[in-house]
Image (cartoon, rainbow, N blue to C red):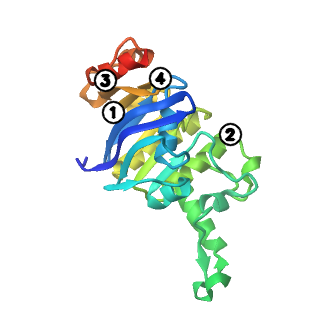
Amino acid sequence: MSEELVLKTVDLTKHYGGVHALEGANFQLKKGEHVAIMGDNGAGKSTFVRQITGVEQRTRGTIVFDGKEVEFKGPIEAREAGIETVFQTLALADHLDVPDNLFLGREKTKWNWLGPFRLLDYKAMRKDTMAALEKTGVKIPNIHNTIEKMSGGQRQCVAIARTASFHSKLTIMDEPTAALGVQETVQVENIIRQLKEQGEPLILVSHNMRQVFDLVDRIVVFRRGKICANLDIKSGNYTGEDVVAYITGAKTGAEYEGAARLIY
């Protein structure tokens, strides 16, 4: 794993009026590293992700991505810069089929010499969709079905396959297995392992303790909008009980003691 940073945030803060949803988040992610973000509901996890991906504009703070300070105006800018994200809301187009969703916003075309009159290359997109589903182990009986006709698990798998199909500089998954059955969860976890093998960094937002300990190198715990712990779980020094203690406030990482006192 490289020591080079792919993402760094300094004093990342988001206020909604008088509500301090995220306060002073200092975070680092190395290239090839997989990090889980954990915390209770309302702890600031998803707010943190929304600032990184440009879904919301931060109140203050700095984001450095791939060596450059960035200020994304929206998630499309973040994606163009190399950040692929699976949100809890999925962001799929219900009336489109699987290939159209996989290539939404980055459609393949043919006869490009025609300029603005070039045509969509549906055959190439179908072929690449089948290859992407096979690569990720996602099983969709009929890729021509529209998303609205699919189960919640199938929809989630399509969103994750879309994310994993395009080589990115950073992948973010926000509760990717929350609505999935056992078999679909295994598929998603295998995709995450593939990303690790390929050296692609990942931020995983999850409540699933077993999953986190199986898949990531480090856990960053949020509590009441602040980071309260940074745990190297590969060292073997931490258990699930330790993580719960940090989530609930029974423990706070030594380097975050001052911030923790400000929470209460």
Residue 183 figure quarter: top right
Residue at numbered disc 3? 256
For the residues labelled 3 and 4, say whether their Cβ atoms are less than 8 Å apart. Answer: no
Residue 191 seen: no
Q: Which residue: 72% across, 58% down?
A: 96
Q: CA distance from mark 3 to mark 4?
A: 13 Å
Residue 177 point in image, percent of width and height? 55, 35
230 and 25: which is toward the camera = 25
Q: Earlier in the sequence, mark 3 or mark 4?
A: 4
Type of amino acid at the residue the image marks with label 1: Arg
Type of amino acid at the residue the image marks with label 3: Tyr
Q: Earlier in the sequence, mark 2 or mark 4?
A: 2
Indicate left or right for 45 with 229 as reference.
right
Residue 91 point in image, percent of width and height? 64, 49
Question: Compared with residue 263, is residue 147 higher up or lower down, i.e. above or below?
Answer: below
Q: Which residue: 58% across, 84% down?
A: 112
Residue at numbered disc 1? 218
Residue at numbered disc 4? 224
38 and 213: which is toward the camera = 38
Indicate left or right for 256 with 214 as reference.
left
Indicate left or right for 84 with 120 as reference.
left
Q: Kindly report which numbered mark, 3 or 2, lies closer to the viewer in this rendering.
A: 3
